[in-house]
Image (cartoon, coloured by chain):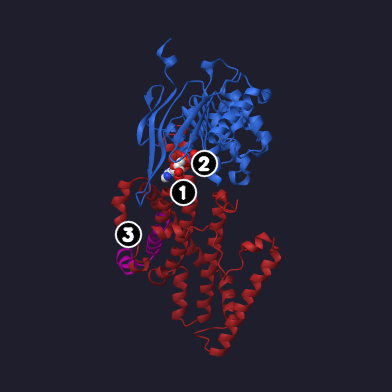
């Protein structure tokens, strides 16, 4: 339980990702152009290292050159194959996240608000939580077979835990003073849940959503690798069997790109849904 | 005279409040053996050094905390929990960070008992009136983190007043304001409390402050508390004429009463900074 609260930092600024403006950059009014250049530079360094490594190993199967990967990327993009696979995977992701939100958020409210409900459900959650989603793939293959259901099932499973734990933490973390204030205004319990606990928990739930998404997106590849005849994970496995490394790499890049874009979108959603939860620390 | 005329609005009878630290079990006596009667229509100020238990007393009257021993009654009935008849303005404001200034002020009217039975546009009108009252017209759509500390305090005050409770419990409600705004709002507060109305139409106000002149200007009586443990040191009736305006500050009695209160808390005030 503790751990899910610790992750509750509104905007992680990782040193390896200069695309996001650092605090110092914001304070100094760092021009956007300059920060764009920094991003470009770190990309250039990365590609240079990759190129050097590819030249040194000289084994196109293990490490294709950036140029061959770019060519593969281009051809996959032009014939639409990559878009098809990305859309397939993304649709599965969206469905799983939807199910996870519908299941985990209300459950989290129930567990956060009611000690009794928590006492019933929490042991089950604690037993299941350490079991990786991937561990269920073989069993899921027997039950669902190869197809759409298996990756959706695995992703939903993976996404539920961070969402559930963060919802519980958010509900329990509701500012007691605000609850007290609402009670002194004669606000009934149901309205307190709707108008105080829900918005109070929302920033933490949004962090859970991002964690859930990151987990689910990592799991989809494994699930599709084994249990699906389509999607980005399946494509990687397909081209691996054909020994076409540049295409394997191209799909790896696609996975990264989709994942990154989704996280950017989620961050934007976070900012619009909880505008009060940022930039307040220094106020 | 009927019973309701003599019965106090609020009655604290030998109230003691102890807090036990969660792990160590160490006990702090926040308030010790406090007895106090507040009549309906009274404006009572509580002054005393930091940590003497002013907020604790207010929380117990609000029903947010239970006394460890002793009883608190409102209209002769023991207080069992919070209710919209006793509105609270918290020392740290307790504004909802996700609501704009306007929505904060309207929270009780829209969601709680105060707005029950009111038509939606009456509610909105009442909110607007109180936004104007605390002079926050330009900041209506801002969020609490986007406004200054003094503005936040005015939002909290407007929220309390908009709810129109019978008993006003205010914890240093004007402490963060500049001197001029403060004087203006003191006068407004007296008006809203019902200074010009006949006594039975006035609200009952409990007002915590560190400002002696403010206490004298506003109150019918000033409760002076002392700390370690929190006790009532004295209750001074303020016999200045009402309605009060700026001239009352020049009244010789005003200076005399201020001096008396200062005498009562001087030792402790000096000890606190020594
Ligand atoms: N929840 C609590 N748990 C433990 N001790 C508490 C708690 N609330 C208050 N106290 C203690 O009770 C005493 C009185 O606190 P209180 O907040 O009532 O003081 P106060 O008179 O309002 O002070 P100030 O003028 O600084 O606001 C203090 O010693 C404080 O440490
Ligand atoms: Mg206090």
In-front residue for pair A194/B228: B228
Packing grade of label 3 (10 A; few <14, some 14-19, many >=20) is few
Residue beneath disc 2: B50
What type of secondary structure mainly makes up the magenta span?
A: helix
Start-end of magenta stretch: A136-164
Distance from mark 2 CB to nearest ligand 1 atom below 8 Å: yes
Residue located 38% across and 22% down the image:
B76
Q: Can residue B97 be seen in this view?
A: no
Query: Between residues A23 and A62, which one lies in front from this camera angle?
Result: A23
User: What number is the disc on residue A201?
Assistant: 1
Q: Which of marks 2 and 1 is in front?
A: 2
Residue tagged 3: A126
- Residue A249's disc number: none
The front one of B26 and A7 is B26
Determine whether the residue tagged by mark 3 lies in a helix, strand or loop.
helix
Chain painted in blue in the figure: B
Q: Nearer the viewer, residue A2 or B235?
A: B235
**Same-chain check, marks 2 and 3:** no
Indicate the secondary structure of the residue bearing disc 2.
loop
How far from the left and from the top, in percent, is residue B100? 58, 41
Q: Do the residues labelled 2 and 3 touch (CB within 8 Å)?
A: no
Q: In this view, does A110 lie to the left or right of B126?
A: left
| Chain with colour red in the figure | A
Position of residue B220 measured from the top left corner of the image (x, y, whole percent):
54, 23
């Amino acid at each position: 339980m503790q751990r899910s609260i610790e992750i509750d930092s509104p905007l992680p600024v990782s040193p390896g990702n200069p695309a996001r403006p650092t605090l110092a950059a914001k304070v100094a009014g760092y021009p956007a152009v300059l920060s764009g250049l920094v991003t470009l530079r770190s990309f250039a360094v990365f590609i240079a290292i990759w190129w050097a490594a590819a030249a040194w190993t000289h084994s196109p199967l293990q490490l294709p050159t950036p140029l061959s990967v770019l060519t593969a990327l281009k051809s996959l993009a032009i014939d639409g194959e990559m878009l098809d696979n990305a859309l397939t995977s993304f649709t599965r992701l969206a469905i799983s996240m939807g199910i996870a939100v519908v299941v985990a958020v209300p459950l989290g409210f129930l567990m956060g608000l009611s000690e009794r409900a928590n006492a019933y459900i929490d042991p089950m959650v604690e037993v299941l939580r350490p079991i990786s989603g991937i561990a269920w793939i073989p069993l899921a293959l027997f039950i669902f077979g190869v197809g759409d259901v298996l990756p959706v099932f695995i992703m939903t499973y993976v996404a539920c835990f961070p969402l559930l734990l963060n919802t519980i933490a958010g509900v329990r973390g509701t500012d007691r003073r605000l609850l007290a204030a609402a009670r002194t205004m004669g606000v009934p319990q149901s309205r307190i849940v709707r108008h105080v606990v829900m918005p109070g928990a929302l920033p933490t739930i949004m962090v859970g959503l991002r964690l859930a998404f990151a987990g689910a997106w990592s799991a989809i590849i494994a699930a599709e690798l084994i249990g699906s005849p389509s999607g980005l994970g399946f494509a990687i496995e397909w081209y691996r069997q054909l020994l076409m490394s540049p295409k394997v790499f191209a799909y790896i890049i696609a996975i990264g790109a989709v994942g990154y874009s989704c996280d950017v979108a989620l961050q934007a959603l976070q900012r619009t849904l909880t505008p009060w939860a940022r930039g307040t620390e220094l106020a | 005279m009927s019973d309701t005329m003599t019965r106090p609005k609020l009655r604290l009878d030998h109230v003691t409040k102890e807090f036990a630290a969660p792990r160590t079990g160490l006990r702090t006596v926040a308030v010790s053996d406090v007895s106090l009667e507040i009549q309906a229509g009274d404006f009572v100020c509580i002054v005393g050094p930091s940590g003497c238990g002013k907020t604790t007393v207010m929380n117990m009257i609000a029903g947010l905390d239970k006394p460890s021993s002793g009883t608190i009654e409102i209209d002769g009935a023991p207080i069992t929990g919070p209710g919209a008849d006793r509105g609270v303005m918290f020392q740290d404001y307790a504004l909802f960070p996700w609501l704009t200034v306007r929505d904060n002020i309207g929270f009780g009217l829209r969601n709680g008992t105060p707005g029950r039975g009111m038509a939606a546009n009456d509610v909105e009108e009442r909110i607007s009136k109180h936004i104007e009252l605390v002079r926050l017209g330009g900041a209506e759509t801002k969020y609490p983190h986007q406004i200054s500390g003094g503005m936040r305090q005015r939002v909290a005050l407007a929220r309390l007043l908009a709810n129109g409770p019978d008993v006003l419990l205010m914890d240093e409600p004007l402490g963060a304001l500049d001197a001029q705004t403060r004087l203006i709002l003191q006068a407004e507060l007296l008006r809203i409390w019902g200074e010009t109305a006949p006594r039975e139409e006035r609200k009952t106000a409990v007002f915590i402050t560190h400002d002696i002149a403010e206490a004298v200007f506003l109150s019918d009586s000033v409760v002076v508390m002392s700390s370690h443990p929190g006790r009532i040191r004295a209750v001074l009736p303020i016999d200045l004429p009402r309605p009060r305006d700026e001239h009352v500050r020049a009244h010789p009695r005003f200076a005399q009463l201020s001096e008396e209160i200062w005498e009562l808390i001087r030792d402790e005030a000096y000890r606190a900074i020594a």
